[in-house]
Amino acid sequence: MRAARAYQSIDQHTSVIGADPLELVLLLYDKLLQRIAEAEMLLQAGDIAGKGQALGKAIELIEKGLIGALDHNQGGELAVQLKTQYALWMALLLRSNINSDMALLQQVQQQVKEVLAVWREVRMLNRTMR
């Protein structure tokens, strides 16, 4: 078990080191969706502390990862809009945590999936333009 976790950690670090900025954003979105799904599962199981930890990690991914990755010089208005969206997600996740509100979790999860789909389209366009 310990070896499997070590391998997974090395694999994740290698993915991050070799990734371009767009790939890093996609990794952050995937990890965010995992944390939200984890929180949803823990909420259903009645594990309030675990749900809180998962949502805390999700909020941290948004705050330190997604917001931190925004380039306001190159991104312009899009970066401003994304920052606003990310702030909304953090507020909804916090409210969901406080109220144990499954509907809010699912709402954020759906929005993240929609934005992720657009980022994946951008990746495909980048690949076809090369």
Image (cartoon, helix red, strand yellow):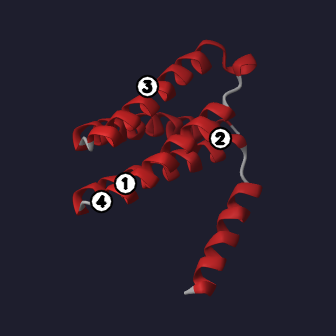
Q: Residue at x 47, y 39 (%)?
A: 116
- Give the Cα separation between the discs numbered 2 and 4: 29 Å
Task: Give SS at disc 1.
Answer: helix
Disc 3 target residue: 88
**For the residues bearing labels 4 and 1, Cβ distance under 8 angstroms:** no
- Give the Cα separation between the discs numbered 3 and 1: 19 Å
Q: Mark 1 or mark 4, which is nearer the start of the sequence?
A: 4
Q: Mark 2 or mark 1, which is nearer the start of the sequence?
A: 2
Q: Is residue 9 left or right of residue 58?
A: right
- Give the Cα separation between the discs numbered 4 and 3: 22 Å
Dividing the picture into quarters, in which one does residue 2 lie? bottom right
Q: Residues within 10 Å of mark 2 (few under 14, many from 20)?
A: some
Which amino acid, by three-letter code, is at mark 3?
Answer: Leu
Disc 4 target residue: 41
Disc 2 target residue: 22
Which amino acid, by three-letter code, is at mark 2?
Answer: Leu
Which amino acid, by three-letter code, is at mark 1?
Answer: Lys
Q: Residue at x 68, y 60 (%)?
A: 15
